[in-house]
Amino acid sequence: MIKLLVPAAVSMLALVAATPALAQTTLLTASPAGGTTTTFTPTGNNGFGNPGPVVINGFSVTGNPQATYGDASYFINANGSWVNFPWVATNNGTGSITFDLGSNYGSVGGFMNYAPGTGSAPTITALDASMAVLGSYDLSALAPISTPAATNGGAFRGIQSTSANIRYFTLSGSYILAHSLTVGGAATAGVPEPATWAMMMLGFGAMGASLRRRAKVTARVRFA
């Protein structure tokens, strides 16, 4: 029986390792309670042609092809414009900016807007410390921001994870820009990763084998 337990555990390990992890993130349309918000304060019109990284209000920001920032007027087509309203932006229809949050968080987001119908889809993406994508959302399809002809209009959009594993936050497409960044959010209970399940199953198999081995030894002593 012991010989059967180990192959069974190995088979379970292979099965669990092959099982994809369940979705870990959700799209936020309101700032979660308990978060810490940083409002950007740069002035002027900076960063054109410079991919960075550049430190803005404590966050290291890298752009592709550039990370722009300031408070000069920023036109966002049908959604109006931002005037004397500090921003960090792609200033590119297909570009991106990535914030290094400095630590891992359970949620991240900000007050943002974009120019509808220009370049690629406005997208927000959460990544872990190894730059692996945790979740990515097309705002135009899932949570559009509509502020017709507004001045300094926008809305909160963000991402919540099932654990505190968000290290980087990327904004891309449609000249997207942000006025603030909110990080925090208590980690919620998540589904164990496949590797965790595998270790648990191997542990159960080893425990079963040990118990059966002890039972046989006890039996031999008792009836000798």
Image (spheres, helix red, strand yellow):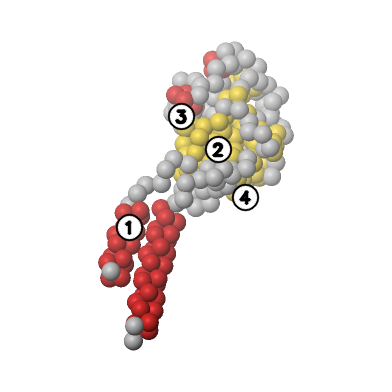
Q: Residues within 10 Å of mark 3 (few under 14, many from 20)?
A: some
Residue 43 percent location from the top left of the image? 71, 32
Task: Determine contact: label 1, label 2, CB under 8 Å.
Answer: no
Of 178 and 37, which appears nearest the observer? Answer: 37
* Three-letter residue code for mark 1: Met
Mark closest to the chain's N terminus, 4 or 1: 1
* Pointer 4 residue: 103
Residue 65 percent location from the top left of the image? 50, 39
Residue 12 - label: 1
Please identify the quarter of the rendering in which residue 188 is found: top right
Task: Estimate the spatial distance between the alpha carbons at disc 4 and disc 1, rounded to whole Å.
Answer: 35 Å
Q: Residues within 10 Å of mark 2 (few under 14, many from 20)?
A: many
Mark closest to the chain's N terminus, 4 or 2: 4
Of 19 and 80, which appears nearest the observer? Answer: 19
Task: Estimate the spatial distance between the alpha carbons at disc 1 and disc 2, rounded to whole Å.
Answer: 31 Å
x 55%, y 38%: residue: 160
Task: Estimate the spatial distance between the alpha carbons at disc 1 and disc 3, rounded to whole Å.
Answer: 37 Å
Mark nearer the viewer, 4 or 1? 1
Q: Residues within 10 Å of mark 1 (few under 14, many from 20)?
A: some
x 44%, y 24%: residue: 141
